[in-house]
Amino acid sequence: MLAEFIQGWGSTVVACAIITFVFGASLVHLRSELRWVRILTDQLGWELVDEVGSKPVGGLAVEALRDELHAILNASDPAWAQKQVRSWQMRAWRLESALAFWVDLLRQLGLLGTVLGLGMSLVVGRGGVQELLGPLALAVWTTVTGLAYSILLSAVYGMKLPAWVDACEKNIEAWDARRRARRNGTGS
């Protein structure tokens, strides 16, 4: 039964399904974090131009961020406020390394399937050509799946993330400089 699973398409399908699941998890994670960076960037942009009443209505995430902004602006402890701003910066910066992590993980899972397929073909494939070729399908298709998903992830997010992270960083710096100037009574 196990030999049929390994020599047939069973192990290949399971390995490719695992890689597909990891790809799905990467999409959910990156979309969520990019959404947060976009909301923060847009909200800080609106705060910087001081257009009261013209801010777009948002969902719960936007309202939570607005509450956090106002808590920082009205904080009696400047160290706490600076720590909160710094946490925004760190979260935005981690987004690019998160993309690199997911892309690398998908490639490594494809490579792991390759090595496992080759290893199984050496162990199982002593009887003939058919027994040798079964595990090689695992080697080939996991490599293709892992590489295809990593390329797709890079294509979808490779240009978006750095642009949004840079914009977010600029807005955080400008908003924080204005906040500190107001707190010190030197700015408008």
Image (cartoon, rainbow, N blue to C red):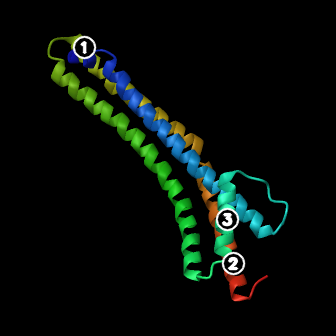
Residue 81: x and y, percent? 59, 76
**Gap between marks 2 and 1 measured at Cα:** 67 Å
Badge 2 vs badge 1, beta-carbon distance below 8 Å = no
**Gap between marks 1 and 3 measured at Cα:** 59 Å
Mark 1 lies on residue: 4
Image mark for residue 67: 3
Image height of 113 relative to 174, above or below: above
Residue at screen point 49% across, 42% down? 26
Q: Earlier in the sequence, mark 2 or mark 1?
A: 1
Of residues 101 and 176, the one nearer the viewer is 176
Task: Specify the quadrant of the image occupied by residue 49.
Answer: bottom right
Per the image, label 2 sits on a secondary structure element best described as helix
Q: Residue furthest bottom?
A: 185
Image height of 79 relative to 146, above or below: below
Residue type (three-letter) at the residue carrying disc 1: Glu
Q: Which label sits in the foreground, 3 or 2?
A: 3
